[in-house]
Image: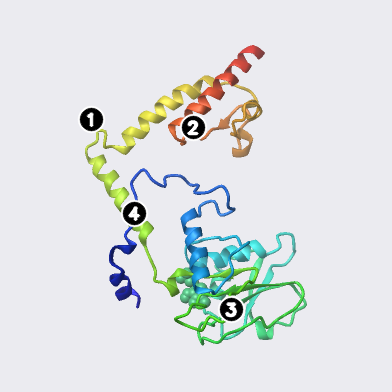
């Protein structure tokens, strides 16, 4: 439905991403959602401000692959982990048809689908999805259970001006929105990976050539050099403790079912980071030699 609109927008939405950009797992360490691009966070806040459908000041923005993924995340986040029985998940009928499946698909031990909120009469904790406007009937709704020990999750997938008048800027504790039903669905991350994989595949076909286009050859050379340097720390006891002493975070062998004489060090950082690691490592080697 939005295709003609986006065609009209032409190049306004064109984005160029270089191969060397956005390579890290982390985009920000300022937000609990560490893979959230700060630019995306800014534009989400800006859009809600422009539309006036939700408050964002003082809120934490968490993104997922569509709001289906966020529905699962919110159930996991709200469900008490220390109770003998799973928390009940309800929504007033007619409810969005995916709620029962989304709730039960992972067969969680901490939450379970309990059906129509109108019929929920157990004296037990619950999570209620309030969909407003509602899918499938477009009705503006509020919570129906209204009891102590309940969490309310507002699914606002359709609280956008093309579907309903925006009468107030909502400020509930937990509000879910999705770009799929309001703006158009996008598969852009797949397109980028498709491009990158093809560049790698093309470089691969020239395996053994010295034109430097082969990612695997490049990676192997870098790792071989890094590994050579790290090998000097072989044979240390209580690796994790010694490394911690010079502020290098490693995972002790104990964490992967091995012995503490082993440690797992990340070798995937940038050159600058690895060089910093090596600098600190030389002091570890010195400490160990002095101990000997
Ligand atoms: C009420 C409601 N919530 C959530 C979703 C899920 O949206 P997404 O496509 O972002 O997973 C939909 C999709 O139809 C929906 O209607």
Q: Gap in Å between the C-alphas at discs 3 and 1?
A: 63 Å
List x then y, in percent, for residue 102.
54, 70
Q: Which residue is drawn at 22% across and 41% down?
A: 205
Q: Gap in Å between the C-alphas at discs 2 and 3?
A: 48 Å
In the image: residue 92, left or right of residue 228: right
Q: What is the quadrant of the C terminus in the image? A: top right
Give the foreground label among 3 and 4: 3
Q: Name the residue under label 3.
A: 168
Where disc 3 sits, the SS reads: loop
List x then y, in percent, for residue 144.
68, 83
Give the foreground label among 2 and 3: 3
Give the foreground label among 4 and 1: 4
List x then y, in percent, for residue 30.
58, 49
Choose the circle earlier in sequence order: 3 or 4: 3
Q: Mark 1 points at which residue?
A: 210
Where disc 2 sits, the SS reads: helix
Q: Residue at x 59, y 53 (%)?
A: 32
Q: Gap in Å between the C-alphas at discs 2 and 1?
A: 27 Å
Q: Which residue is drawn at 33% across and 47% down?
A: 18
Say if disc 2 is inside 8 Å of ligand 1: no
In the image: residue 151, left or right of residue 166: right
Q: Mark 4 points at which residue?
A: 192
Q: Gap in Å between the C-alphas at discs 4 and 1?
A: 26 Å
Is residue 218 shown to the viewer in this render?
A: yes
Choose the circle earlier in sequence order: 3 or 1: 3
Choose the circle earlier in sequence order: 2 or 1: 1
Where disc 4 sits, the SS reads: helix
């Amino acid at each position: 439905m939005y295709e003609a609109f986006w065609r009209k927008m032409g190049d306004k939405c064109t984005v160029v991403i270089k191969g060397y950009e956005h390579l890290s797992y982390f985009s920000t360490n300022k937000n609990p959602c560490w893979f959230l691009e700060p630019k995306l966070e800014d534009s989400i806040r800006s859009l809600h401000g422009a539309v006036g459908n939700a408050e964002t000041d003082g809120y934490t923005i968490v993104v997922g692959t569509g709001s289906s993924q966020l529905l699962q995340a919110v159930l996991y986040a709200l469900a008490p982990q220390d109770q003998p029985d799973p928390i009940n998940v309800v929504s007033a009928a007619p409810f969005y048809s995916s709620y029962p499946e989304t709730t039960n698909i992972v067969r969680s031990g901490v939450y379970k689908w309990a059906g129509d909120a109108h019929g929920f009469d157990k004296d037990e904790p619950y999570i209620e999805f309030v969909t407003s406007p509602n899918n499938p009937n477009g009705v503006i709704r509020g919570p129906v259970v209204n009891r102590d020990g309940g969490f309310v999750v507002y699914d606002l997938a359709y609280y956008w001006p093309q579907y309903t008048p925006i009468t107030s800027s909502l400020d509930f504790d937990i509000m879910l929105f999705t770009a799929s039903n309001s703006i158009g669905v996008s598969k852009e991350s797949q397109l980028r990976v498709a491009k990158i994989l093809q560049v790698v595949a093309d470089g691969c076909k020239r395996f053994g050539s010295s034109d430097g286009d082969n990612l695997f050859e490049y990676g192997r050379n870098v790792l071989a050099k890094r590994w050579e340097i790290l090998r000097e720390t072989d044979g240390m006891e209580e690796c994790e403790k010694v490394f911690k002493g010079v502020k290098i975070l490693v995972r002790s062998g104990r964490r992967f079912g091995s012995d503490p004489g082993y440690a797992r060090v990340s070798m995937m950082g940038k050159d600058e980071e690895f060089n910093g690691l090596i600098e600190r490592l030389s002091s570890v080697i010195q400490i160990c030699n002095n101990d000997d």
